[in-house]
Amino acid sequence: MAHNDIVVLGAGIIGLNVALELSKRGYGQHITVMAEHLPGDESIDYTSPWAGANFSGISGSDANALRWDRSGYLAMMRLIDTGAEEAKYLSKTESTEYWDQAPSQDKIISMTEYLHDLVIIPPSDLPKGVAFGIRFTTVTLNAPAHCEYLKYLLSQPRYGGIKFVRRKVSSLQDAFLYGTQIVFNCIGNAASSLAGVADLKCYPTRGQIILVKAPSVRVNVMRHGKDYETYIIPRPRSDGTVILGGYLQPGDQTRQTRPVETESILSRTEGLLPILKNGETEILHVAVGLRPSRQGGARVELETTPEGHTVVHNYGAGGTGFQAGMGMAKDAVDLASDILSQLRARVDYDSG
């Protein structure tokens, strides 16, 4: 029953990063990841596989977002630089980002402290309507392949042989199995409705993307507008596929794609990167994703439930799960340090 000691509820990138962080600290053999959707699934209710998946300036300027961004970026860079297994579907990529309205000074200062090869673009070199721009080395990820590979790695004995269980729960209480000491709640959009959580600050942010084959695209380009996001993100180890986007539509739960949005995305991305008009670009798929957003930012918090159970909440990352997820996971696991220490002590005692 050892695997039931720790339950990670949710198998999107947030839950996978929590499981990975726990595994690296030696708790892999104690973990069950429980989720309705698992890596490899394709459902609009499973957000992670639809992500463009890169590190960008899309996040907020509050202290938590800045800290998680920095931690996540540096962690991913270390994985790439050390040739870690988890970096198989990560890649260093040249990036240019534009803002129609300049980001806060706090965000600018924070980015200059850690982004590799950062250059602030002179105002004279900015496109019309752009207030601020940077160039730097970013991290791009092949979102579906990365999630599937993390599940594969975490299941291996060297990572603790973590169990993955497909199960839909009707309440947070259902995540506590026989002997479970702690649950990491990483349920994304379900946080707004799941009994025991029912966080009214949570809402979906709709996005529409186009997956294209465009082998000449080797760079990441983004433009952050007041009510839109335009982005071009090449997918590592994907035989030349690229994510084009997109939209940020808070509260919109429309699951169908909209042809007018497809045309807008193609027009905007071709304007940002004209090489997309070289005749090679082939549309493979148009999809919708619902980012798990939350007013005031993500919730990473320890709670003792009315039943006396320990939960660490980790949800509400919106469109920043891939870039901030490792930083959020470190904070989440740190919050559980006392109960994890008790678990380790109990195991050491039993084995002694």
Image (cartoon, rainbow, N blue to C red):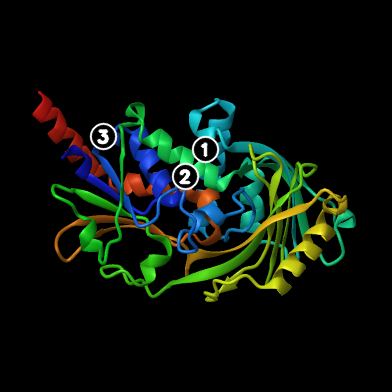
> Image quadrant of residue 313?
bottom left
The circle on residue 326 is 2
Q: What residue type is labelled 3?
A: Gln
Q: In this view, does 71 lie to the left or right of 233?
A: left
Q: In this view, does 319 lie above or below 279?
A: below
Q: In which quarter of the image is the N terminus?
A: top left
Q: Which badge, 1 or 3, comes first in the chain's sequence?
A: 3
Image spot of residue 270 (x, y percent): 82, 58
| Marked residue nearer the N-terminal end (3 or 2) | 3
Question: What's the residue at 17%, 40% (across, down)?
Answer: 342
Q: How many marks?
A: 3
In this rendered view, identify the residue nearer to me: 191 or 155: 155
Q: In which quarter of the image is the C terminus?
A: top left
2 vs 214: above or below: above
Q: In this view, does 13 lie to the left or right of 342?
A: right
Q: Do the residues labelled 1 and 2 touch (CB within 8 Å)?
A: yes
Q: Nearer the viewer, mark 1 or mark 3?
A: 3
